[in-house]
Amino acid sequence: MTKKFNPAEVGRLESPERRRAMPPAGILRKIGLKRGMTFADVGAGTGFFSLPASRIVGPSGRVVALDVSKEMLEHLIAKGPPGWVETKICGEASLPLADGAADLVLACFVLHEAQDPVAFLRELGRVAKPRSPVVVMEWSKIRQKEGPPFEHRLHHHDVEALILQAGLCFRGMEFYNPSQYFAFAFRKEPA
């Protein structure tokens, strides 16, 4: 059973503690975001990654902030993002982007919420350019106060298996800290 993030708890996403623990610009650079890229932020919420990404990609790039919640995206819009940031409401496994539209796709802390994780990952791969990074950041399968309940968390080996089931190439896993990890994948070249 999956549980979506409650928009009433938006303050947790914007806390100074979260920004210190997970500096978004540093994470974006770590995963390869550069000036001029098209960045798809899937599960963008209030823009925790989208707004810093807009400063990195600059006006020659594009940020597409996607979320299933209109309410969450309204928080981002209220911050007045630059013109190269687009907000789009999406379905969980239907992103309103063309095939191969993004140079980098990030889904941070949303895979564990997906009703159909394989379909969700397949869709992330569809919107990425071939061989471009698809990055999934998730909570480690440990018991702790922060983050989702233990039952909702995904073990990193399970995420690797889901990536492969989705038809993506698994590039590797990296622990950001003991509580969180990155899974790196990419879409195969068309035959």
Image (cartoon, rainbow, N blue to C red):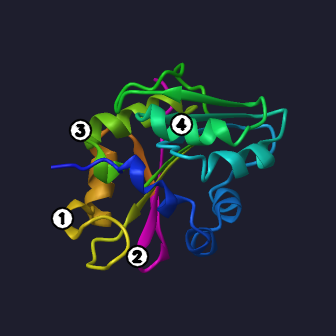
Mark 2, residue position: 179
Magenta part, dominant SS: strand
Query: Visible in this render: residue 187?
Result: no
First of labels 4, 2 by sequence position: 4
Mark 4, mark 3: which one is toward the viewer? Answer: 4
* Residues marked 4 and 3 touching at CB (< 8 Å): no
In the rendered image, the vertical position of residue 95 relative to residue 132, given as above or below:
above
Residue pictured at 36% horizontal, 68% vertical = 147
Per the model, the C-alpha gap separating discs 3 and 2 is: 23 Å
Residue for point 27% across, 63% down: 153
Please tell me in which quadrant of the rendered image residue 36 appears. Answer: top right
Instruction: Tell me if residue 88 comes above or below residue 81 in the rendering.
Output: above
Residue at 45%, 26% in the rendered image: 95
Give the residue type that dot 3 points to.
Asp
| For marks 4 and 3 on the same chain, the one whose residue lies earlier in the sequence | 4
Question: Which labelled disc corresponds to residue 151?
Answer: 1
Nearest to viewer (mark 1 / mark 4): 4
Q: Position of residue 9 (x, y in %)?
A: 42, 56
Question: Which type of secondary structure does the marked residue at label 2 adopt?
Answer: loop
Tell me which segment is drawn in magenta. 172-191
**Residue 48 placement, left or right of 113:** right
Compared to residue 79, the image places residue 48 above or below, namely below
